[in-house]
Amino acid sequence: MIINDIAPELAPSAVERILTYVGNPPVFNSMSDLEEYLRTIYEPYGYLTDEHWRFMCETSYRRMDNGHITTHYDPKIVTQFTAHPDDYDLWDEYAQIPCPTLVLRGQVSDLLLPQWAERMTKIGPKAQVIEIAGCGHAPALNKSQQIQIVENFLKG
């Protein structure tokens, strides 16, 4: 199993950050405005090339009836955080994972805290944790060394 920058618990500050933009999708006049917005809210992802940002923009929008552009996801996704906040306390379930597990953690992730990554190496599958330098939440797996980490684990 490969877990990309999440723990059996969510950092409240990261959830608050996500809630600032997820529940109320903004409206844009142009794709370049949307791309600028995505670069801001997803800045914690870490390094992405201009090509990656453009691709994210092209695959993350929908055209509204009035011709404007907005992000393309269900804004009700935020309901999960607000109506069921205890659903993210999954340490007991994590402890039961029987297979080899790799946890990727962005070095400056605000979602997977260092102490939780450490705990994940000590219980359940006793995961191998690899931190991705210069990255927040979550490693995009778009650089050859990140892909190589995954390939090596799967071959392992």
Image (spheres, rainbow, N blue to C red):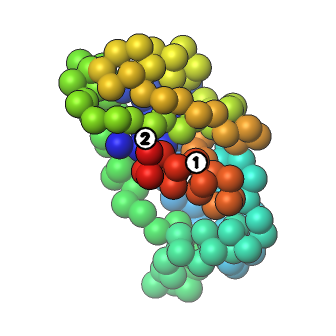
Q: Position of residue 62 (x, y in %)?
A: 49, 77
Residue drawn at (45%, 37%) of the image: 102
How crowded pointer 1 is (Cα within 10 Å; few <14, some 14-19, many 20+) is rated as: some
- 49 or 26, nearer to the observer: 49
Vertical side of 135 occupied by 71: above or below: below
Q: Mark number for residue 21?
A: none
Q: State left or right for residue 77 relative to residue 131.
A: left
The answer, for residue 95, to whether it is visible in the render is yes
Q: Position of residue 119 (x, y in %)?
A: 45, 15
- Residue under the point 68% across and 69% down: 52
Residue 48 position within the rendered picture, expressed as x and y whole percent measured from the top left: 73, 59
Which quadrant of the rendered structure holds the C terminus?
Answer: top left
Residue 20 at least partly seen: no
Res. 149 mark: 1
The residue positioned 75% from the left and 53% from the top of the image is: 47
Q: Give the residue type at disc 2.
A: Ile
- Amino acid tagged 1: Ile
